[in-house]
Image (spheres, helix red, strand yellow):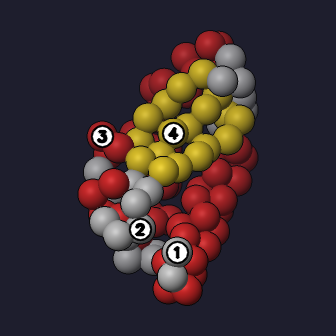
Amino acid sequence: MTKTQKQRDKQIRQVLTIACENIKQTDFGFAYLTHTVDLNNEANTLKVQCYFNDDLAYQKSELHFDALKNEITQQLATIGLAIKAANISFLVD
C-alpha cells in the first residue's frame, strides 16, 4: 500500500467512525459498522456493513434505514467519496 493509499484509508476510517458514533446516539441497539474497499477503485468497490445487536434492534431501526444511509453518505461526502445506497447493508450481529 502506498503512502497516499494509507492516508486515504485513514480518511475513510475516520469519517466512518464519525458516522458510526452518530448512528449509535440515535439508534439504540446499533453495534458497529465495517467496510471493504479496493483503494485503486474506491468509488466502485466501497461497501459498508452496519450491524445491530439483535433482531429487535434491527426491526426498530428498519423504518429509518434511509436516514442511516444518509448519515454514512454525508460523512463520506466530506472527503469527496460517493457511495451507492445499494452498497450499504444492514445485518444482525
Q: Residues within 10 Å of mark 1 (few under 14, many from 20)?
A: few
N-term mark: 2 or 1: 1
User: What SS does tag 2 mark?
Assistant: loop
Q: Nearer the viewer, residue 30 or 40?
A: 40
Side of 90 relative to 51 (left or right): left
Q: Amino acid at mark 4?
A: Gln
Is residue 61 visible in this depiction of the protein?
Answer: yes
Q: Look at discs 4 and 1 and give the one toward the viewer.
A: 1
User: Dot 3 corresponds to which residue?
Assistant: 86
N-term mark: 2 or 4: 2
Q: Quadrant of residue 16?
A: bottom right
Q: Residues within 10 Å of mark 4 (few under 14, many from 20)?
A: some
Residue 47: x and y, percent? 41, 48
Disc 2 and disc 1 in contact, CB within 8 angstroms: yes
Q: Residues within 10 Å of mark 3 (few under 14, many from 20)?
A: few
User: What SS does tag 1 mark?
Assistant: loop
Q: Is residue 13 above or below residue 68?
A: below
N-term mark: 3 or 4: 4
Residue 85: x and y, percent? 32, 45
N-term mark: 4 or 1: 1
User: Dot 2 corresponds to which residue?
Assistant: 39
Q: Look at discs 2 and 3 and give the one toward the viewer.
A: 2
| Distance between the alpha carbons at the discs numbered 2 and 1 | 9 Å
| Distance between the alpha carbons at the discs numbered 2 and 4 | 17 Å
| Distance between the alpha carbons at the discs numbered 3 and 4 | 11 Å
The residue most toward the front is 1
Q: Look at discs 2 and 1 and give the one toward the viewer.
A: 1
N-term mark: 1 or 3: 1
User: What SS does tag 4 mark?
Assistant: strand
Residue 49 badge: 4
User: Dot 1 corresponds to which residue?
Assistant: 1
